[in-house]
Image (cartoon, rainbow, N blue to C red):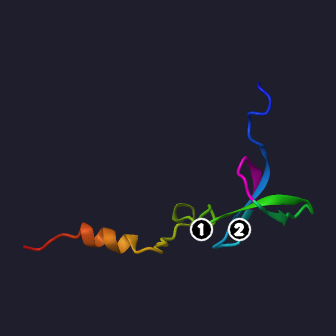
Amino acid sequence: MKKDIHPDYRPVVFKDISTDFSILTKSTVKTNETVTWEDGNEYPLMKVEISSASHPFFTGTQKIVDTEGRVERFRKKYAKKED
C-alpha cells in the first residue's frame, strides 16, 4: 500500500440527535466535535438525523420528517385530478 494516501480510519461516535442514541464504531468521517464515551476516552462526534433508533424501518412506526414541505408538494403535483 502507498503511504499517506488513505484517510484516517479511527473510532468515531455517531449520535442520533432526535433520540439521543449513540454508537461507537470506526469511520473516516471528518468532524470538529468530540465526546467522552462510556469507557472514559474522548472520541470524535458525528451527529446524524436518522439512525436505527429513529428510522421507521427499524422502529415499525411511520414518522414523516418534512421540514421543507416536500411531501405536500409531491401530493399536490401527483394528486388524481377529477374530471
Quarter of the image for residue 49 reads bottom right
Identity, as a three-letter code, of the amino acid under mark 2: Phe
In 3D space, how far apart are the residues under numbered discs 1 and 2 (Cα atoms)? 9 Å
Of callouts 1 and 2, the N-terminal one:
2
Residue 75 in picture, x, y percent from top left: 30, 71
Q: Describe the element under mark 1 as helix, strand or loop.
A: loop
The residue indicated by pointer 2 is 21
Q: Specify the farthest residue to the front.
A: 4
Q: Which mark is residue 54?
A: 1
Residue reaching furthest to the top: 1
Q: Quadrant of the N terminus?
A: top right
> Percent position (x, y) of residue 20?
71, 72
Q: Is residue 40 magenta?
A: no
- Give me the residue at 44% from left, 73% from top: 68
The correct choice, above or below, for 1 with respect to 6 in the image is: above
Q: Dot 2 lies on which element?
A: loop
* Position in image of residue 5 (x %, y %): 74, 33
Q: Which residue is outermost to the left?
A: 83
Q: Quadrant of the C terminus?
A: bottom left
Q: Dots 1 and 2: beta carbons under 8 Å?
A: yes
Above or below residue 30? Residue 9 is above
Q: Residues within 10 Å of mark 2 (few under 14, many from 20)?
A: some
Q: Residue at x 32, y 68 (%)?
A: 74
Q: Is residue 53 left or right of residue 77?
A: right
Lateral position of residue 69 relative to residue 21, left or right? left
Q: Position of residue 8 (x, y in %)?
A: 78, 43
Q: Which residues are magenta?
A: 23-31
